[in-house]
């Protein structure tokens, strides 16, 4: 039983209704829609620190949304710790913690109240000891009683990480967790997440900071236009393209795919 498993996942977003009307007025017909993922199969084993890389629009967030139950695949099957994300959605979501890209928060609660409320979603009513540990490790202990509105952007992002960890999920997904944040937060976050990984938590990371992925991840998958174009260990990917580092390998693989697309 794998931590994360995707089998032949495809996702097509339908055209917007407003575009349908525009095409109809022009005498055209609605297009098929946007294919965000195309027959993606991927397995992440328990305890892995796995990197998911790709340019904007490659399908990374769509894949995460399907695993988290926020979007439904057009075809294929996905599971978290063996639980199907559709038929066993309660157990699948209980096994998963997701740190989203967007800063989403309730402005009427303090940091501690936010984490207690998040705990309640998972039926955890006496969770303060773990909440205190998370706050300490993420540098939020002195902000526990601060209102969410009063926090800086970097502090709000730390709270998002804390929310994802509050129910102690075995699998943690980090979707661009350090985008636009200061160096201090990046160091604090990676130190804590690395310790969680060493304790057995499975980590799936998406990032545009390729040096982070190179330092942290054991295996890497690269997405482009909804397809996996590379999947291997860090060392094997570098050896495959003769790259000196992950950024070099990423650029070469994306370039090779662009050439193949032109020739197709």
Image: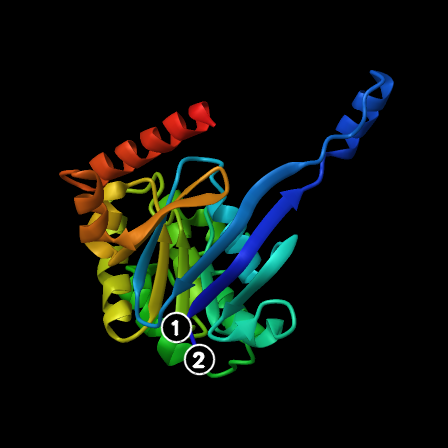
Q: Secondary structure at mark 2?
A: loop
- Give the quarter of the figure containing the N terminus: bottom left
**Residue 159 at x, y percent in the picture:** 41, 57
Q: Is residue 234 above or below residue 47?
A: above
**Residue 202 at x, y percent in the picture:** 35, 68
Residue at position x 16%, y 39% in the image: 242
Q: Is residue 55 above or below residue 164?
A: above
Task: Say which mark, if any, is on residue 32.
Answer: none
Specify the quadrant of the image occupied by residue 174.
bottom left
**Residue 45 at x, y percent in the picture:** 36, 69
Q: Is residue 1 left or right of residue 67?
A: left
Q: Which residue is mark 2?
A: 127
Residue at position x 37%, y 58% in the image: 204
Q: Which residue is mark 1?
A: 131
Q: Is residue 180 left or right of residue 31?
A: left
Query: Would you say residue 237 is visible in this rendering?
Result: yes
Distance from the alpha carbon under mark 1 to that under mark 2: 6 Å
Q: Secondary structure at mark 1?
A: helix
Q: Residues within 10 Å of mark 2 (few under 14, many from 20)?
A: some
Residue at position x 13%, y 38% in the image: 244
Specify the quadrant of the image occupied by residue 2.
bottom left
Q: Is residue 186 left or right of residue 223?
A: left
Q: Is residue 194 above or below residue 170?
A: above
Query: Would you say residue 112 is visible in this rendering?
Result: no
Q: How is the image coloured?
A: rainbow
């Amino acid at each position: 039983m794998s931590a994360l498993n995707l089998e032949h996942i495809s996702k097509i977003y339908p055209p917007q209704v407003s575009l349908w009307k525009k095409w109809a007025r022009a005498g055209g017909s609605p297009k098929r829609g946007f294919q965000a993922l195309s027959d993606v199969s991927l397995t992440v084993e328990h305890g892995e620190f796995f990197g998911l890389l790709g340019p904007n629009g490659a399908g990374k967030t769509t894949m995460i949304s399907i695993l988290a139950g926020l979007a439904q695949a057009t075809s294929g099957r996905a599971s978290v710790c063996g639980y199907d994300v559709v038929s066993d959605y309660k157990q699948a979501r209980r096994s998963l913690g997701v740190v989203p890209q967007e800063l989403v928060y309730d402005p009427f609660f303090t940091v501690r109240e936010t984490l207690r409320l998040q705990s309640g979603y998972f039926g955890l009513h006496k969770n303060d000891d773990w909440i205190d540990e998370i706050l300490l490790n993420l540098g939020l202990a002195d902000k526990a009683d601060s209102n969410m509105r009063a926090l800086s952007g970097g502090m709000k992002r730390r709270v998002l990480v804390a929310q994802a960890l509050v129910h102690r999920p075995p699998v943690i997904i980090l979707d661009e967790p350090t985008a636009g944040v200061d160096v201090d937060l990046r160091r604090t976050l990676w130190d804590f997440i690395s310790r969680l990984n060493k304790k057995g938590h499975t980590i799936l990371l998406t990032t545009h900071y390729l040096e982070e992925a190179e330092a942290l991840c054991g295996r890497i998958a690269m997405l482009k236009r909804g397809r996996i174009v590379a999947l291997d260990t860090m060392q094997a990917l570098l050896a495959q393209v003769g790259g000196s580092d992950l950024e070099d390998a990423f650029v070469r693989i994306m370039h090779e795919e662009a050439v193949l697309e032109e020739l197709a």
